[in-house]
Image (cartoon, rainbow, N blue to C red):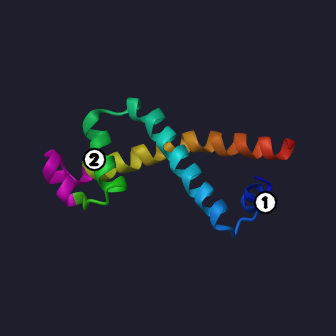
Amino acid sequence: MDEKLAELDDPASETSQIWNREHDRHVLRQLLALVEPHFAPNTWKAFCRVALDGARADVVARELEISLNAVFIAKSRVLSRLRQEAEGLVDSAADFSAKS
């Protein structure tokens, strides 16, 4: 167990890198779940298709039968809200680290 904990303490270790990736995925899932209810279904779907699935905006616009501009606005609004919510998490984590 001590060996695994030491690996976590080393940012270059494979264990530490896996831990960090999994942590980042978990935080992202939580942020997405937190902000999704604040958006209309089409806005959310446009964001997911472009930002998460990597679909081209013009393809998403056709799929959802909305304008290309609406796709870009959806992505921008959701990203803005995600940044806003994440800011509080990062500040909280920094406060926690400073107190440790």
Which one is closest to the eye, mark 2 or mark 1?
A: 1
Q: Is residue 51 left or right of residue 31?
A: left
Residue receiving disc 1: 6
Residue 84 drawn at (x, y percent): 55, 42
Quick one: SS at disc 2?
helix
Residue at 28% of width from left, 47% of height from top?
46
Q: Residue at x 27, y 50 (%)?
A: 71
Label 2 crowd bin: few (<14), some (14–19), many (20+), radius 10 Å: many
Looking at the picture, how far across and down is residue 35, in whole percent?
45, 35
Q: Residue 38: within the magenta? A: no
Sequence-wise, the earlier of marks 2 and 1 is 1
Q: Is residue 57 left or right of residue 99?
A: left
Q: Which residue is labeled 2 in the image?
A: 46
Specify the amino acid type for callout 1.
Ala
Badge number at residue 15:
none
- Which image quadrant for residue 16? bottom right
Residue farthest to the front?
A: 1
Q: CA distance from mark 2 to mark 1?
A: 43 Å
Q: Can you tell which quarter of the image residue 38 is in?
A: top left
Q: Which of the 4 quarters of the picture holds residue 50?
A: bottom left
Question: Magenta segment, principal secondary structure?
Answer: helix
Q: Nearer the viewer, residue 99 or 6?
A: 6
**For the image shown, how many numbered marks are present on the structure?**
2
Left or right of 73? Residue 79 is right
Query: Does the image show residue 27?
Result: yes
Q: Residue at x 50, y 38 (%)?
A: 30
Check disc 2 and give the amino acid type: Ala
Segment tinted magenta in the rendering: 58-69
